[in-house]
Image (cartoon, rainbow, N blue to C red):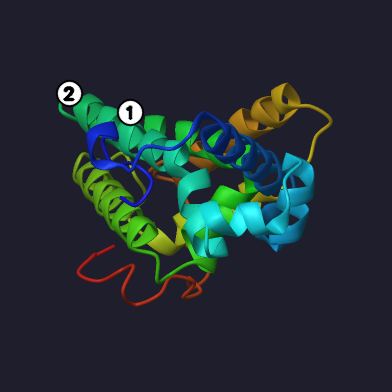
Amino acid sequence: MTDELPHNRRPALRSDAQDNRARILAAARALFAADGLRVSMREVARHAGVGPATLYRRFPTKQALVDAAFANERRACHAIVDEGRAEAETDPWRGLCLVIEKVCEVNALNHGFTEAFLFAHPDSPEFIASRTYTVNAIAGLARRAKEAGRLRADFVLDDLLIMLMANQGIRAASPADRVAASRRFAALIIQAIQASGERSPLPPAPRLATAALLKNQKL
């Protein structure tokens, strides 16, 4: 990935350049998390206390900045789905629930990441790889949970996108309050998708996902 090369493969930066880069990334992460990707490059530069020229030397495009700013979140999503897969070896339903709970928490804390992951940057190799890995893992967990009789039979992956978009709308005064609200929301979602003998059929699912995102997924 662009921003994740080992140190021995990256050109060395002077200490002042390293400091500027760190300040830019910290500003971008804070602004994107709070306000999403509508934040401009000029706003990021101003928040970081650097000039636009300095920002563009480090990150020539907004896409490059977004990719670098959300590297930690992409890694977190990968770790979450890996944890869910490990849990699913003994309990597929619990593995799926774990992923829903933790992904909701990540997304509640960072509105910009949800936006980038779902919609805004379909051509970024970093986000394409992250989406593919995460969606394939969740699709596999869902199939196994259905086979175990724990996930309702009419669940589709588009339901997950609806969940993430709704979770993105959580607004609260503090990060702790957003996490608490997200956890309650995830619990409600899990109850709604759990298999039961007394379930009314769901309305038809809107096709929110791109064809590429859902390619080869049978849910």
The span from disc 1 to disc 2 (Cα, nearest Å) is 9 Å
Residue at point 63%, 52% (across, down): 54
Q: Is residue 210 above or below residue 177?
A: below
Instruction: Indicate the position of residue 17 as horizontal and vertical percent values.
Output: 54, 38
Residue at label 2?
A: 90
Q: Residue furthest right?
A: 173
Image quarter (top left, top right, bottom left or bottom right) of the C terminus: bottom left
The amino acid type, in three-letter code, at marker 2 is Thr
Number of dots carrying numbers = 2
Mark 1 neighbour class, 10 Å CA radius: few under 14, some 14 to 19, many 20 or more = some
Instruction: Indicate the position of residue 206 as horizontal and vertical percent values.
Output: 51, 74
Residues tagged 1 and 2 counted as in contact (Cβ below 8 A):
yes
Q: Is residue 140 left or right of residue 47?
A: left
Secondary structure of the residue carrying tag 1 is helix
Is any part of residue 116 visible from this angle? yes
Is any part of residue 170 visible from this angle? no
Q: Is residue 193 above or below residue 210?
A: above
Q: Is residue 124 left or right of residue 88?
A: right
Give whichever of 150, 94 is nearer the camera: 94
Residue at point 56%, 40% (across, down): 21
Residue at point 31%, 74% (across, down): 212
Instruction: Indicate the position of residue 214 as horizontal and vertical percent values.
Output: 31, 68
Mark 2 neighbour class, 10 Å CA radius: few under 14, some 14 to 19, many 20 or more = few
Instruction: Indicate the position of residue 89 as horizontal and vertical percent values.
Output: 15, 28
Task: Classify residue 189 by image quadrant.
Answer: top right
Instruction: Give the number of the disc on residue 94.
Output: 1
Task: Classify residue 52 by image quadrant.
Answer: bottom right
